[in-house]
Amino acid sequence: MTEMSQARKTDDGLHRAAIVIQARQLLATVCILGGNDCPLLSKSEARAILDRVKGDPTVTMRLDSDADVIPHYKSFDSTDPTKTDRQAMFNRKRDLDVLQRLGLCPGDTRRARYLYTLLFERIATPFGICAYETPGWEGCPLARSGAYERVREQGWQAVVYLRPQPEKDEYRRRNVEAIMNGERLFIRPHHLLCIACGHAGGELRTPRPEDTIYEIIQRIQAEPDVPITLVEGTCDVCDCCDGYSPPNHRCVHPGGLIRDYKRDLDVLQKLGLMPGDTMKARALFKRLFERVPSTKDVCGYGDGVSRSHAWSVCGEPQGAAGYARTRETGWF
């Protein structure tokens, strides 16, 4: 790796977890936030985690479990080969129940907003994970207290940082100024498809609250030869999005994350371009429409199959109708 490419990398990606907890403890943080004294995690540990994710949605969290390190039965006490730590066994089941519901495996790392969004989508109550009606498996008496459910009703925003609207408004103002008056536009490659899809052959007539696609369309329609420089990572589309984190320019939107980085690279490959390459808007979209006939080719991974939540298909699996309309009608 060259010195320049190494210098461009940051150390806060998904390759490095800032917080490491057992999978069951993700539920515990919510129960404690809801007012319970959860036996799975101390209040001080929970508070440290909650304070961090409430202040920074880009925090990476790894969910661990020791479920796959149980030795062969002959390694147990020879006088009682069935003897086991019942609490440890229960906790292993809790870990795997949480991971299975989330579609994850031990050691998987995600950003905080992604995890809590997914948690609230897929786990409505800790009962059935932390406690059961089965004799001997009663588990935690607080599993039916309603503490978890009360926090869940408020949504992920109750746990993880959400950008304030005034900040988003100010970023939009500055971003629109740069889009309309700058010498060039800076756009991540897969957002070219988003722009065409949003345009939908002329149906987009007002600004959108979470991006500046409308304003970018206005600029390229008024100036078809405006230069567009392709960049990896967040770009001119992103500044007012609630999933954009200004301090480190990360995308923390749960539908984004790593899948959009693959889409960027897929578009670059199909266009035969590299990050930093610049083309006039008219020529760039002409090449895009020639080489990417459908969003299925990029946003649907070529086959329209969504293999997991992290690799979900954006829009219609067989291709977005809005993109097809813009590709047919053009906009210059």
Image (tube, helix red, strand yellow):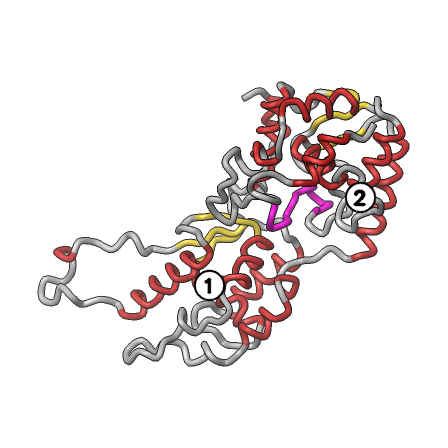
Q: Residue at x 88, y 34 (%)?
A: 180
Identify the residue under disc 2: 204
Rendering quarter of residue 280: top right
Q: Which residues are magenta?
A: 244-256
Tell whether position 140 is magenta.
Answer: no
The residue nearer to you, when weighing 54 against 146, is 146
In the image, 28 versus 256, the foreground residue is 256
Would you place residue 181 above or below residue 15 in this image? Answer: above
In the figure, 84 relative to 181: above or below?
below
Q: Position of residue 213 (x, y in %)?
A: 78, 40
- Residue 163 location, x and y as percent? 73, 55
Residue type at the position of mark 1: Gln
Residue at screen point 55% across, 38% down: 300
Of helix, strand and loop, which one carries label 1?
Answer: helix
From the image, state whether disc 2 or disc 1 is nearer to you: 2
User: Could you give the CA–CA distance between mark 2 and mark 1, rounded to whole angstroms?
Assistant: 44 Å
Give SS at disc 2: loop
- For the point 57% across and 32% down, the residue is 297
x, y percent for residue 296: 57, 36
How packed mark 2 is, by other alpha carbons closer than 10 Å (few <14, some 14-19, many 20 or more), is some
Please name the predominant secondary structure of the magenta segment in the image. Answer: loop
Give amino acid for label 2: Leu
Q: Say left or right for 19 vs 167.
A: left
Please state, as top left, top right, bottom left or bottom right, where the N terminus lies in the image.
top right
- Per the rendering, the mark at residue 173 is none
How many discs appear? 2
- Mark 1 lies on residue: 25
Whole-percent x and y of residue 84?
22, 66
